[in-house]
Image (cartoon, rainbow, N blue to C red):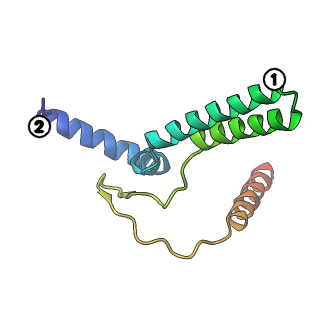
Amino acid sequence: MPLSEYEQRVLEQMERQLTSDDPRLANTLTSRGRRSVSRYVLGAAGVAVGLLLLIFGVVASRAWLGVLGFIVMFAAVTYAVARPRATGPAGVVRPDGRVTRSPKPQAKKSRSAGFMNRLEERWQKRRDSDR
């Protein structure tokens, strides 16, 4: 059932309000990052193989096989629940509420430099506010 014109206007107004209040959250919500079912299937298969290795290791009194089974299970679960590598946001939410494709990514700056700059800025703000 399609939305009425009034509902569409209200929804667009809410989207614009969200974008103006928290643009970072709006970009996160519009970005692609869904996990595919195949990640879960491969993870479950890895857990099953790891569990079998663990059981055979215990039955055969081979500690190394049990440890290998545990490592395989751990790796499979980690693979299944880990976030897929992001290729960048699918789009950018503009102040007027429109979502547009993001430009091609430019050369990335060092994340630690940005992190350190933010920490220094916060420190300066705290020092200035205490005076």
Quadrant location, the N terminus? top left
- Of labels 1 and 2, earlier in sequence is 2
Q: Secondary structure at mark 1?
A: helix
Q: Secondary structure at mark 2?
A: helix
| Residue on which disc 2 sits | 5
Pointer 2 local density, CA inside 10 Å: few below 14, some 14–19, many at least 20:
few
Q: Amino acid at mark 1?
A: Val
Does 16 sit left or right of 49 as displayed? Answer: left
| Residue on which disc 1 sits | 59
Which quadrant of the figure has residue 108? bottom right
In the rendered image, residue 54, in percent from the top left (x then y), is placed at: 76, 29
Q: Are marks 1 and 2 in contact (CB under 8 Å)?
A: no
Please report the residue visible at 19 percent of the width from the left and 40 percent of the height from the top.
9
How many dots with numbers? 2
Please report the residue visible at 80 percent of the width from the left and 30 percent of the height from the top.
57
In the rendered image, residue 103, in percent from the top left (x then y), is placed at: 40, 70
Nearer to me, 77 or 24: 77
- Pick out the residue farthest to the bottom: 107
Which of discs 1 and 2 lies nearer the camera? The answer is: 1
In the rendered image, residue 84, in percent from the top left (x then y), is placed at: 54, 50
In the rendered image, residue 120, in percent from the top left (x then y), is placed at: 76, 61
Q: Amino acid at mark 2?
A: Glu
Does 13 sit left or right of 6 as displayed? Answer: right
Say if 125 sits above or below 44 in the image: below
What is the CA distance from the residue labelled 1 to the residue labelled 2?
67 Å
Nearer to me, 77 or 72: 72
